[in-house]
Amino acid sequence: MTTTQRIQTPFGEESTATEVIEGIDLSGKHAVVTGAGSGLGAETARALVSAGASVTLAVRNTDAGERTATEIRKATGKDNVRVGRLDLADKASITAFASAWTGPLHILVNNAGVMALPALERTPDGWELQFASNHLGHFALAVGLHDALAAAGNARIVSLSSRGHHASPVEFDDINFNTRAYDPWLSYGQSKTANVLFAVAATSRWGADGITANAVHPGVIMSTNLSRYMDPDQAAQLRAAEAAGELGSIQGAPFRFKTIAQGAATSVLVATSPQVEGIGGRYFENNNEAEKLPPQAVGSASGGVAPYALDPDAAERLWKLSLTAMEA
């Protein structure tokens, strides 16, 4: 199915992963979910397993992954879940994971991520760590798994982005903060923009192989590990607002808090819904395709996708840069 119309579904911001996958049969399908040891990744994996998919939890901490796999087996009554080690900041780990994969891969959920590292950190290759972990690692993983995705015939990649992409486009002239002052949210923002641009370029380059990719914003969920690097005072304020049932605000943008089950819903919907079959290069939030914002609304709007995140020229430039980084 292909369409230029914005995808709208019966689901909304309060829908859960269980609700959006109801009635969908994934028997015989294989999926990989990165960062699935806890939080959104674990809930995404649980939903896919419950629908019959064989799911690999791609995690850095395999002990935590095994505990989550055991919990998923108990919750679903199904055994079709296993654990694989993957460190997205380690090229050798990515290569080993991809090389060990055999058979087709129908769903790849690039869920793992870090947010708002308080100080500038770099990989051994000199890449700023948020950009490297959130984008470059997942890029290398997808490239390494390309043949398995192509073998599936109709594979889907889900790239977890964020409303945080409003904070910054990819600053190609200084991605690594070599000359500009490091800012945790600008760094996070450009990495989340990169996650959208990856979906645009992957669909353009790999669509003929039956592979589509879309980006999703899961919402703000304070009970996951993603918030572990936030300023403690800011995190405490957000948790207090959540407990009081009030709106939260990050970088001046208001939002409603979500549960883990609600946060995982958009990833699960984009990975499995018949409405998204053959659709790629788009950005979804609250279980629907987001509106493309006018440039002047970026940064102040509570939702929507920035035009620069869907720019095909920027997507192609990022793809070429990422290939160079991967091959270095």
Image: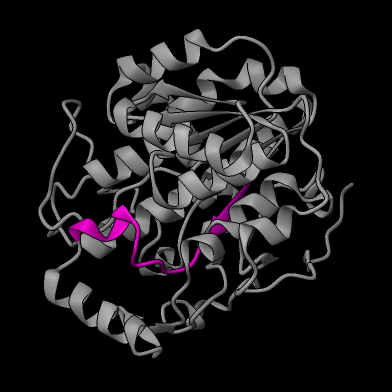
Q: Quadrant of the C terminus?
A: top left
Expressed as whole percent of the image width and height from the top left, the position of residue 90 reads 28, 23
Of 269 and 259, nearer the camera is 259
Residue 168 picture quarter: bottom left
Q: Is residue 204 visible?
A: yes
Q: Residue at x 34, y 57 (%)?
A: 224
Q: Residue at x 71, y 47 (%)?
A: 280
Residue 242 magenta-highlighted: no
Q: Is residue 314 visible?
A: no
Of 276 and 177, nearer the camera is 276
Range shown magenta: 214-229
Residue 218 magenta-highlighted: yes
Expressed as whole percent of the image width and height from the top left, the position of residue 137 reads 38, 32
Reply above or below: 266 against 244.
Answer: above
Of 230 and 126, nearer the camera is 230
Residue 76 picture quarter: top right
Q: Residue at x 47, y 61 (%)?
A: 260
The chosen color scheme is one colour
Expressed as whole percent of the image width and height from the top left, the position of residue 2 reads 87, 49
Q: Total marks drawn?
A: 0
Reply above or below: 69 against 44.
Answer: above
Residue 14 picture quarter: bottom right
Reply above or below: 201 against 283.
Answer: above
Expressed as whole percent of the image width and height from the top left, the position of residue 98 reads 48, 16
Q: Residue at x 77, y 24 (%)?
A: 28
In the rendered image, the residue lying farthest to the right is 1
Q: Is residue 186 left or right of residue 285?
A: left
Reply above or below: 306 against 137.
Answer: below
Q: Is residue 277 left or right of residue 325?
A: right
